[in-house]
Amino acid sequence: MECEIKYKPAFSTIFVTLEPGDKIIAEAGAMASMDSQLTIKTQLSGGFFSAVAKKFFGGESLFVNVFTNETKQYLNLVLTQSVVGDIQEIELHGKDMYFQPGAYIASTPGVKMGVRWAGFTSWFAGEGLFKLRLSGKGRVFFGAYGGISKKAIDGEFIVDNGHLVAYEPGIQMGIKLSNGLIGSMTSGEGFVNRLTGRGNVYLQSRSIGGLVGFLRSKVR
């Protein structure tokens, strides 16, 4: 299977070439176009209870689509996301990775998706009560609003609310005022995420919450 991400970073799109026998799993609604010979099967994401948990707690669709090349020729598939922004690919080698709700786009067989409790700290930081947990071995494609940057953390790192996309299990999330009570209120930053530990995090350059707030101020 060959995958190429084009039109980065604002309009990133995944172009997949499936060899005979290849298959890829994608979030419902991610398909932009495909060769008509491809077989598409819709199924619950990881079984009934797992799918319901990911739908209501993880911000993902109840169903996923499995695209399979059952022919003897190479076939093409194009996948995308609903927001304007970048798409990144990572390879899992038996190590977990946590994703914020809505980030997952597609993965190869061997990758398992579940939901884990993120805690009230995550909810208070605007990141939700639950997080997606991807494990196993394979390739994962995820997207974000704006550009995606990778940051290696060894100690403490501060991230504004709504900009965290994915992180490794060695990272712990906390919440703090950006600059004391008065400074936080006057600076407009308020509360921020305090990440501690060692590992990689992925950040998005734009915030959906920030966009909503901007648009709300213009339509009053």
Image (cartoon, rainbow, N blue to C red):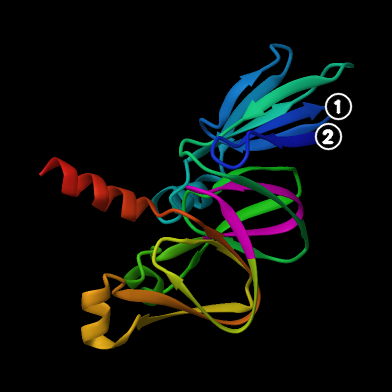
Q: Is residue 79 left or right of residue 130?
A: right
Pointers 2 and 1 in contact (CB under 8 A)? yes
Label count reads 2
User: How far separated are the C-alphas under marks 2 and 1?
Assistant: 6 Å
Q: Is residue 110 left or right of residue 201?
A: right
Q: Residue furthest top?
A: 36
Which residue occupies the foreground of this view, 28 or 1?
1
**Where is the N terminus found, in terms of image quarters?**
top right
Give residue 20's position: percent from left, percent from top: 87, 24
Compared to residue 196, the image places residue 131 above or below, namely above
Q: Residue at x 84, y 16 (%)?
A: 71
Which structural element holds mark 2?
Answer: loop
Compared to residue 152, the image places residue 146 above or below, namely above
Give residue 65's position: percent from left, percent from top: 60, 32
- Please check the rendered image and state whether residue 139 is part of the magenta-colored stretch, yes or no: yes
Q: Which residues are magenta?
A: 132-150
Q: Which residue is mark 1?
A: 19
Q: Residue at x 32, y 49 (%)?
A: 211
Which structural element holds mark 1?
Answer: loop
Q: Residue at x 46, y 61 (%)?
A: 163
**Which numbered circle lies on residue 1?**
2
Q: Residue at x 32, y 76 (%)?
A: 191
Give residue 130's position: percent from left, percent from top: 44, 63
Write down the quadrant of residue 37 in the picture.
top right
Q: Residue furthest right?
A: 72
Residue 46 makes an appearance in the image: no
**Which numbered circle lies on residue 214?**
none
Give residue 111's position: percent from left, percent from top: 71, 51
